[in-house]
Amino acid sequence: MREKSVGADAHISPQPGETKKAKPKKEPGNGFAVRYIYPILWWILRITLPLYHWPRFRGRENLPEGPCVICANHAGFADPLWVFLLMKTRLPPWTMARSSLFEKPVFGPFLASMRAFPVDRDNPDLTAVKKSLSVLKNGEKLLIFPEGTRVKKGKKSEPKSGAVLLAQRAGVPLVPVYLTHKRRPFAPMRVIMGKAYTPAYTSRRPDAAELEALTAELMEKVYALGK
């Protein structure tokens, strides 16, 4: 009696005690939504947002080719969208957003699919730091609002030093971006990108005082763009 040959493509059942390897889950922000839906949303935003504010984009040519930390002042809920329109790239930058936004049932997963990830603004967030460094070391761009929350014109902000620290750890430049503070409906607003630069770090591990000073320098560059 002839034995049946087993072909290379034949199905082999797992032996008792063996389990099939689960397929790795695709990380949010690298799937269908950001690659195919985002370009459509970009054009929708490009048409609809200017109906409410009349943007004047400047400095788009200052965006580096490689990884960088884009740092903007924060005056309105739609600030990330204005930065996306300014950049005019095929994919959006990875964006830090406050963790409470991701608690909403539909909105949270949508943000994650569009390359946003949560950060705890009130406590050290090692997960957000690791994610940020991973993004930068993979050659991608990261958008951060150092002020952490929306700051109205005339109000004093207390920017966090995380953006400077991440840029230093990853060895990438900072890119300042200014968005008009006081915005009125149906009035011009400016969205300006400055030149990328690398702060003058005095050591490989700058201390808290140096990071604070360099962050103040960064925000001065941001607001200088609006003068």
Image: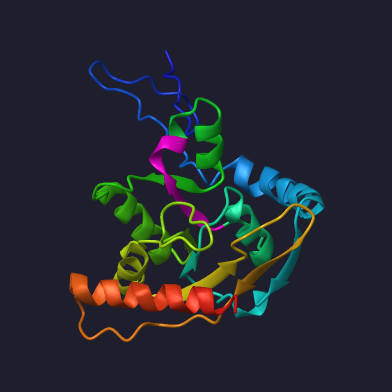
Quarter of the figure with residue 195 = bottom right
Give me the residue at 48% from left, 79% from top.
221
The colour style of the image is: rainbow
State left or right for residue 11 relative to residue 130: right
Q: Nearer the viewer, residue 24 or 184?
A: 184
Relative image position of residue 37 (x, y in whole percent): 69, 43
Q: Is residue 20 above or below residue 168?
A: above
Task: Confirm whether residue 150 shows in the render.
Answer: yes
Q: Nearer the viewer, residue 99 or 180?
A: 180
Q: Nearer the viewer, residue 68 or 96?
A: 96
Quadrant of the image for the N terminus? top left
Relative image position of residue 112 (x, y in whole percent): 50, 41
Relative image position of residue 198 (x, y in whole percent): 40, 82
Is residue 122 highlighted in magenta?
Answer: no
Q: Is residue 200 above or below residue 131?
A: below
Is residue 100 highlighted in magenta?
Answer: yes
Q: Which residues are magenta?
A: 93-101
Give me the residue at 29% from left, 70% from top.
169
State left or right for residue 83 relative to residue 53: left
Quarter of the figure with residue 160 = bottom left
Quarter of the figure with residue 25 = top left
State left or right for residue 72 relative to residue 191: left
